Image: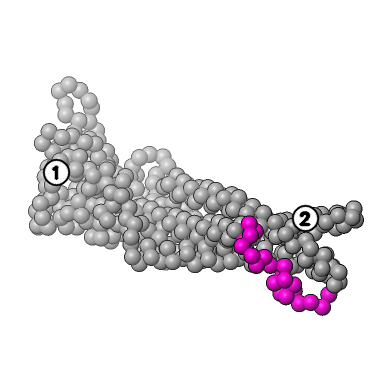
Amino acid sequence: MNVPLFIARRYLSSKKKSVVNWITRISVIGIAVITAALIILLAAFNGIESMVEKLYTEFDPSIIIRSTQRKTFSDKTLKISSIKRLPFVENTSKAIEEIVVLRNEKKWVNAKVVGVEKSFMKMAKIPEHIVDGYPTFDEKGVKMGLIGASLLEKLGGYIPSHTGFEDVLCYFPKREAKVSPTSNPFRIHQLHLAGRINYNIDVNNENLLIPLELASELLEYDDDITAFYIDIKKGENLEKAKEKLQEIVGPKFSVKTHLEKNELIYKTSKSEKLIVIAILVFIFILAAFNLVASLTMLYIEKKKNILTLQSLGANEKFIFKIFYFEGLLIAFKGVIIGAIIGTIVCLVQYFGELLVLPNSGNQAFPIKFKLTDGLLVLSIVSLLSILSSYLPVKYLVYKNRINRLDGTLI
């Protein structure tokens, strides 16, 4: 066959406004909408995942070391000097964690007190998360505390200004106390709150940060601690750092990363992302049926033109290529339009911040582009488009050959 393929395709294309044209347009629109939705939703999920990771990783240290045998352990049993000399270690802090009772006037709440060293201020980027007050553990020799934003609201407390503070009564459990009607199992301390911090729902509702020395004194821990926090340098491999630390501390201590601590949150986020992709791919397959219908109707509408081409010497392979490439043009037109629309919508949200998260203080809905996700979307829609064009045309050509042998044409 000497007729160029593109000329033959133009010859078989539908010029008049028929049902085929409308189905073709619907196919393009359907594919474009689903492609755009895939790009937008993946960018949104990446943004949410990044936001959640930031909220939890900025407060939680990269790695936490705890004893596997008891709640507390002496800091002398941990090779702290060796850990600090490791090349991937950015910062460290001893920590004491305990459940205490807080009181402000007639309001009582349970809280998780975390005694930390001053280095934790840099590790957790506390100055960036101060809502009221100021970031300090010591003011003119007076030990101060920093409280979760929601926890202070539960107590009905208020930090008036950048130079003021709020007082709360803290009930610390005595380490060797025996519960009896005549004894008090708590050590009561009036704590000045220098600031209110805002991280994530867990920290905001539960945590009270105080200096390590104050926590050790009030809980009678002496040299004992409950955990050792380690901040890893940016770009270092977290798993390799964990393995190295486990070799140093031995089997008496457990070494966990922040990903393992909040494993459920990260797994849930990734699972939701995969479920959404699966649903949208299924919808894309349904939209591709319009393309199948369009190619089928076009093939039937042009049966006389097909006979003409065959009388000129066109074989089945040539006819297949005409309709196959017609299907690809329809599909990839939708893919390109959808990709452009999806990208524009994401860019508008990223720079214009039109949508905001509810109850977030006008924080824009996060959007984050990933090259791997973009390639994933294009790979999925391209593969489905190729199959949606190839399979029906292959069947139609085959069916046409069978019918010709019977003396008919579909």
Quick one: quadrant of the C terminus? bottom right
In this view, the residue in front, 226 or 346, is 346
Look at the picture and state if 300 lies above or below 6: above
In this view, the residue in front, 254 or 39, is 39
In the picture, measured across the screen, residue 331 lies left or right of residue 254, that is right
Residue 32's image quarter? bottom right
Q: Which mark is residue 395?
A: 2
As shown in the figure, which amino acid type bears the numbered disc 1? Gly
Question: Residue 37: where, in percent of width, then height?
Answer: 49, 56
Q: Secondary structure at mark 1?
A: loop
Residue at 17% in and 21% down = 181
Within-10-Å neighbours for mark 2: few <14, some 14–19, many 20+: few
Residue at 65% in and 67% down = 15
Which residue is labeled 1 in the image? Answer: 157
Q: Is residue 62 visible?
A: no
Look at the picture and state if 385 lies above or below 108: below
In the picture, measured across the screen, residue 268 lies left or right of residue 78, that is right
As shown in the figure, which amino acid type bears the numbered disc 2? Tyr
Question: Residue 71: where, in percent of width, then height?
Answer: 35, 40
Residue at 49% in and 67% down = 340
In this view, the residue in front, 325 or 151, is 325
Q: Which contiguous range is marked in magenta?
A: 1-21
